[in-house]
């Protein structure tokens, strides 16, 4: 049993068989073979290895012809590995004695070799582990042949394990059959992590190297509450986790029943709790959990997981679907937040310059750069807004000029629609996300020019603390409990209230139960959270009074270190709703 610690990004426990991407790219269908089939299976292994050898020999010849002997020698080394009698006998032994399937046995043995190379403390040898993974891929390809499963159409439920999953790859996963996932890289609020929340599957990211420890078909537990993954758990551990799974299911079911109850503090102050969505289908999940609307619709996901262009009608249909589901409650449609880790295949060209994508062409900058794209979206939003309480929100604004340009384009779009006689909602409110410290500092000026603010703590934290939200190496510097973040949120709330506009927090901070008393105490009356978290956030609000929340906020602001703030907030939540402390 191997236990690895990563970053918990989507709650819950998942138990199932591993599908290790990157190492195999396809799934090992069976872990064991029947005792009477052992000889046939070993024959199948030999045939596959022979075919791998032939393939490598062909590549060796080709490389030698085209590039010279030294390149051909690379394949010669691979060939030696496959022909190594020790390798064959180790795989055969696992099939004979433990009745492993040839796929599972080869994967186990090759992974062990790769791991040994990685642990020798020699950089050159560690890099050769990649050759072994390569070899594993070809052995599996030959063994599985036509039986290879496509990731987008898995036949059975699996736990996906990968070095990294881009938001596009995650969006394209077969959602029905992914029980949970873990990745070697990725941070607290990477968009892949956010997608795990949207898919409502337990996830852990930033685990560091672990793929060498796991083979496809291994039993794995993902603990999305504590950020742990357990490979090959023993019976005791499995039992404990099955129990935890049951318990959290029953808490979730109880909270779900309370969904329709209004979210009001004990002393009668209404705190609106809305949902963050990436796909129109999630509007249902918001509604079922008693959301007060959609506070953040990340529309760029319309472009991720597909290579297709999107038309005005595609946008319009998606927005209509959300509006129809949500009814009279507000739907905040955020214009495209493309760039950084969200680059659709069809737009790679546009984003190919610059080494620092989080500080480069992203978000509203993309919309201002490609106005056709922007106008297409704005037309669809304004048209859909006729049927609901729709609000437009611009992401990652960093200067007043940018905001004014975006509003000017919006005016042009309205004029076009007017001229064309197409119905649209002229008075659709316009707001911005506060995600860049410059905007927080000038919040009073921005508040004069918009109808609302929504604080995007995910980006605000990365830009304030200079720590990439997706990089686990700097995850200790990325901290929502940092006193600077509390101060900056307080400043924005004060600016909004002095100008009489509404302010929401829609970053992941507001989906974390321990921050709720603090945010309410800082004056927030609107929160937008991941749909899964809605019931528990409402439950905390129903246990709070405003003076109690204000006292918590005031005491938190007296603390100097993020660590102390975090401990203090966890302690306070434990007094308010002990069962929600993770
Ligand atoms: C944020 O930055 O807090 C936010 C909500 O936007 P996203 O996570 O999509 O960048
Ligand atoms: Mg953001």
Image (tube, grey):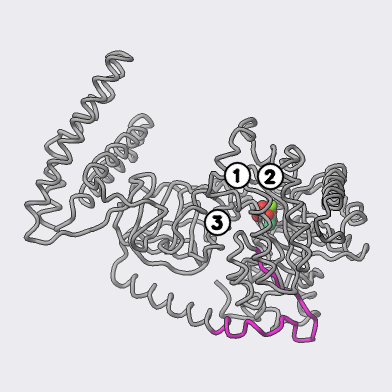
Can you tell which mark lies on residue 309?
Answer: 1
Q: Quadrant of the C terminus?
A: bottom right
For marks 2 and 1, give the one nearer the viewer. 1
Q: Which residues are magenta?
A: 254-276
In the image, residue 559 lies in the stretch drawn in magenta: no
Q: Is mark 2 within 8 Å of ligand 1?
A: no
User: Which image quarter: residue 53?
Assistant: top left
Task: Tell me if label 2 and label 3 are in contact, CB under 8 Å.
Answer: no
Q: Secondary structure at mark 3?
A: helix
Numbered circle sitting on residue 353: none
Q: Is residue 346 placed above or below 315 in the rendered structure?
A: above
Q: Quadrant of residue 115?
A: top left
Callouts 1 and 3 close, C-beta under 8 Å: no
Q: Which residue is mark 3?
A: 193
Residue at 27 percent of width and 39 percent of height:
138
Answer yes or no: is residue 145 visible: yes
Res. 193 image quadrant: bottom right
- Nearest the viewer among 55 and 205 is 55
Where is residue 425 shown, x and y percent of the image? 83, 61
Task: Give the camera-side residue of 45 and 11.
Answer: 45
Q: Which residue is mark 2?
A: 466
Magenta residues, dominant SS class: loop
Compared across the picture, whether 449 is left or right of 387 comes to: right
């Amino acid at each position: 049993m191997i236990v690895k610690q990563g970053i918990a990004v989507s709650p819950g426990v998942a138990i199932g068989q591993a599908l290790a991407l990157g190492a195999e790219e396809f799934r090992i269908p069976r872990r064991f073979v029947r005792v009477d089939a052992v000889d046939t299976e070993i024959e199948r292994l030999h045939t596959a290895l022979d075919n791998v050898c032939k393939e490598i020999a062909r590549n060796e010849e080709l490389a030698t012809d085209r590039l010279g002997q030294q390149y051909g020698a690379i394949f010669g080394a691979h060939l030696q590995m496959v022909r190594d009698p020790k390798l064959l006998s180790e795989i055969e032994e696992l099939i004979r004695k433990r009745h492993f399937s040839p796929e599972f046995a080869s994967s186990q043995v090759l992974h062990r070799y790769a791991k040994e190379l990685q642990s020798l403390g020699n950089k050159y040898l560690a890099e050769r582990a990649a050759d072994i993974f390569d070899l594993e891929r070809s052995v599996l390809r030959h063994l599985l042949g036509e039986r290879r499963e496509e990731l987008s159409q898995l036949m059975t439920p699996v736990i996906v394990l990968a070095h990294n999953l881009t938001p596009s790859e995650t969006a394209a996963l077969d959602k029905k059959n992914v029980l949970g996932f873990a990745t070697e890289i990725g941070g607290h609020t990477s968009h892949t992590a956010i997608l795990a929340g949207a898919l409502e599957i337990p996830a852990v990211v930033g685990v560091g190297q672990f793929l060498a420890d796991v083979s496809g078909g291994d039993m794995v537990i993902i603990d999305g509450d504590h950020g742990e993954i357990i490979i090959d758990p023993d019976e005791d551990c499995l039992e404990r986790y099955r129990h935890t799974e049951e318990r959290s299911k029953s808490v979730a079911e109880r909270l779900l029943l309370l969904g329709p109850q209004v979210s009001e503090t004990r002393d009668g102050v209404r705190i609106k709790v809305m949902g963050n969505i990436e796909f129109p289908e999630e509007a249902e999940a918001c509604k079922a959990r008693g959301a007060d609307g959609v506070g953040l619709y990340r529309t760029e996901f319309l472009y991720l997981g597909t290579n297709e262009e999107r038309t005005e009608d595609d946008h319009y249909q998606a927005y209509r679907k959300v509006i129809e589901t949500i009814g009279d409650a507000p739907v905040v449609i955020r214009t495209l937040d493309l760039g950084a880790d969200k680059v659709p295949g069809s737009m790679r060209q546009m984003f190919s310059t610059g080494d620092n994508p989080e500080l480069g062409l992203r978000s509203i900058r993309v919309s201002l750069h490609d106005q056709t794209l922007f106008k297409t979206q704005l037309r669809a939003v304004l048209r859909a807004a006729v049927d609901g309480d729709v609000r437009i929100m611009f992401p990652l604004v960093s200067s007043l000029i940018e905001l004014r340009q975006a509003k000017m384009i919006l005016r042009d779009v309205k004029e076009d629609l007017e001229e064309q006689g197409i119905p649209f909602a002229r008075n659709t409110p316009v707001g911005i996300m506060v995600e860049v410290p410059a905007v927080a500092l000038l919040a009073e000026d921005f508040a004069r020019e918009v109808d609302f603010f929504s604080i995007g703590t995910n980006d605000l934290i990365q830009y304030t603390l200079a720590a990439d939200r997706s990089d686990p190496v700097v995850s200790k510097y990325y901290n929502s409990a940092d006193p600077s973040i509390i101060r900056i949120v307080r400043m924005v709330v004060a600016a909004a209230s002095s100008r009489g506009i509404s302010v929401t927090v829609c970053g992941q901070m507001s989906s974390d139960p321990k921050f709720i008393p603090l945010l309410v105490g800082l004056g927030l009356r609107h929160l937008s959270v991941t749909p899964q978290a809605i019931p528990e956030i409402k439950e905390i609000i129903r246990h709070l009074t405003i003076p109690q929340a204000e006292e918590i906020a005031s005491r938190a602001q007296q603390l100097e270190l993020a660590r102390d703030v975090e401990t203090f907030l966890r302690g306070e939540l434990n007094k308010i709703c002990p069962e929600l402390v993770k």
